[in-house]
Image (cartoon, coloured by chain):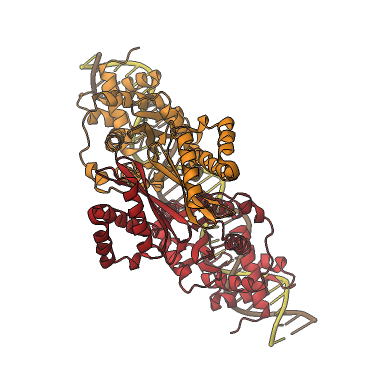
Chain colours: A red, B orange, C yellow, D brown
DNA sequence: CGTTAGCACTCAACACCATCGAGTGCTAAT
DNA sequence: ATTAGCACTCGATGGTGTTGAGTGCTAACG
């Protein structure tokens, strides 16, 4: 059996209707809803076919039909093709506030949540290389040295180092020159033991300080890797009865709090470096606890290889049209934003 | 009518039992539960008295009694007195990880959540004065200057400033000296317009840069004021039926996400600089949406006047004993931690 | 042969009702 | 003052009948 033109129309009508109401949809509804001028009986026959093909299911014998994961998939795929209109609003809201990076991303998450009424997430961008761009030691007070480390993408980190003795200006200068000439432009992997001991040797009696600095550098770069995730609109979950029974809601909220659970999504999204919007429906989701949800994600990319992810999570009957539109808009906003990368 | 010895015992028994079961407790239960050797009938009489006194209420005519807010209040107050035992565990867990400040606070929130099964929060410490301790400009590359600002309590902030022309070493040195000699030790309020224009004048052709730096400083100090709050265990809300009906749960989750809603709590806790543990029961809570909850809070204090708050939020029938114990432990851990204040 | 009217059937949802039992207040006996 | 006893209250539980939306199937129709 084939999915002919008429079946397609009916299937889309069923899904669209279900997205709006959240209730199983029956043959009579479709008969009136579409302009096919078919009786409910005919629709019933077609629906039986569609069910056999696996696009729709009945929650119980005498109920209407609801879309299966396969049905949603079909709907989303066909929608992605025809959908090329853009959402014009939102545009300026983000640009308006040239805030710090983290404020901006928080804002992006919130914006999406308000706009769609679903739960949203935005990850901070990560740099693939993490090379050291700038490094400086300053004497903060007699007992402390402040180390400022800037890595590519203008991510800035600070560390305070305790020192036993007071270091004079000359020494500070010497150490700064030493560190900069040898570490500049290097990434974490390139700072190996050989380099470290060579540096220590050159620093002479200040070897221990060098060691501390390098430790700090290493940790700094590492720290940059366990990423930050901003979420918003988690309480929107309660707007959709199919998600808000206690067990499911608890699991979802938990996933949003224990943000590392979301990292699976990120890996998956990043995978093939694709620049496309991805839609996970139900069981397709890489996250177990979200198999009753649908997830829409996209990558954004600042200049110099900094990449992050944005995502929206909602019920399977989410308004895919709107969600994809919103994601597209935010993505393009973030994409065109490189040069604002202060932190 | 007075609250005599026996009534006290019965009241405590009622509350304790209710805390455990979450069910209204009847006279028979108390008759057997306590070692007073009284029949259920006698208990009933006493319970009628206690109800008249306002310590307990009946959810409906033929049900057992549950504590009123006043009852909880009585219970907590009497418990606070006799309670002097300490929780020995936890102690090391925090110290073990000499992580960065934010990691540590996150950890503290999590620890409390795991330990008590309630929702928890920890605010980052704030400095009451916010004086500038150290300030330095460095040339990062030809088009950007990096400004590092350290404010009291070793909170470090960075800002990148765009510059049109390349500045030579001498100029940088001059600007640094100028800024440090004039701004060091000042707080936000003390940097007024007069000072700014005086500085601009002294900087001569570099006035615009000075202006940018001062802007950055102002914003930095301000930013430090809209505090960070770490939360954990929000999904524990679902463990308590009395909180997990959809409307309430949604409100609570929302309060935890929109963290500024929690600030009312902080103001309240900080108010009289008291060093005590505070317990808000039901309507006593300063936060409207939490009037079905109880909230236990305490201040912690690093050295040099940095103060923050920790808090636990749960159902009114929370295990006050354990919660107060946990809060005490964490508080004392954080209190003894000053000297680890890197960021 | 595709379409449709008609009909018997299914089943969740709802309202109704009787029952049960935990718990109460009151009274009279101890 | 305490307690046993009893009538009473009322939420919870579970069974029953009804309703109505929706189905599948069959037979009639153009």
Q: Quadrant of residue B240?
A: top left
Identity of the residue furthest to the front in this view: B170
Q: Position of residue B321 (x, y in %)?
A: 28, 33
Residue ID at (66%, 56%): A91
How many marks overall?
A: 0
Query: x, y (%) of residue A51?
Result: 56, 74
- Picture quarter containing residue B40? top left
Q: Is residue A178 above or below residue B206?
A: below
Left or right position of B334 against D27? left
Task: Look at the picture and state if B263 lies above or below B52.
Answer: below
Residue under the point 34% across and 57% down: A217
Residue B61 seen in the figure:
no
Front one among A40 and B142: B142
Specify whether A301 is left or right of B316: right
| Residue lying at 53% horizontally and 43% vertically, measured from the top left | B213
Residue drawn where x is 53% and y is 38% of the image: B218
x and y percent of residue B215 in the render?
56, 41
Closer to the camera in the image, B122 or A155: A155
> Above or below — where is A208 with respect to B23?
below
Does the rendering let one see residue A21?
yes
Considering depth in this image, is A281 or B60 the residue closer to the camera? A281
Q: Assign the N terminus of chain A to one quadrant of the image.
A: bottom right
Residue B285 at what x, y percent from top left?
45, 30
Front residue (pair A195, A261): A195
């Amino acid at each position: 059996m084939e999915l002919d033109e008429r079946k397609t129309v009916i299937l889309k009508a069923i899904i669209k209707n279900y997205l709006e109401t959240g209730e199983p949809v029956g043959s009579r509804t479709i008969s009136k809803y579409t302009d096919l001028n078919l009786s409910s009986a005919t629709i019933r026959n077609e629906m039986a076919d569609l069910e056999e093909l696996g696009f729709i299911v009945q929650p119980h014998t005498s109920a209407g039909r609801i879309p299966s994961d396969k049905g949603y998939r079909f709907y989303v795929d066909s929608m992605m093709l025809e959908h090329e209109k853009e959402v014009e609003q939102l545009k300026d809201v983000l640009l308006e506030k040239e805030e710090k990076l983290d404020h901006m991303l928080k804002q992006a998450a919130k914006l999406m949540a308000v706009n769609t009424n679903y739960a949203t997430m935005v990850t901070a961008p990560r740099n693939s290389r993490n090379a050291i761009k700038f490094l400086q030691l300053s004497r903060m007070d007699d007992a402390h040295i402040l180390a400022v480390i800037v890595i590519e993408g203008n991510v800035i980190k600070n560390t305070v180092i305790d020192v036993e003795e007071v270091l004079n200006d000359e020494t500070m200068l010497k150490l700064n020159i030493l560190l900069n000439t040898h570490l500049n432009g290097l990434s974490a992997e390139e700072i190996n033991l050989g380099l470290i001991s060579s540096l220590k040797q050159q620093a002479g009696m200040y070897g221990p300080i060098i060691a501390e600095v390098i430790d700090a550098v290493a940790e700094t770069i590492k720290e940059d890797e366990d990423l930050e995730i901003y979420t918003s609109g988690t309480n929107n979950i309660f707007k959709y009865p199919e998600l808000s029974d206690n067990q499911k809601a608890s699991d979802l909220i938990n996933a949003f709090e224990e943000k590392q659970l979301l990292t699976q999504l990120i890996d998956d999204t990043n995978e093939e470096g694709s620049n496309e919007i991805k839609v996970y429906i139900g069981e397709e989701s890489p996250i177990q606890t979200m198999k009753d949800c649908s997830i829409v994600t996209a990558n954004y990319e600042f200049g110099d290889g900094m990449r992050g992810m944005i995502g929206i999570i909602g019920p399977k009957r989410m308004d895919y049209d709107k969600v994809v539109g919103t994601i597209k808009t935010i993505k393009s906003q973030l994409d065109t934003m490189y040069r604002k990368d202060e932190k």
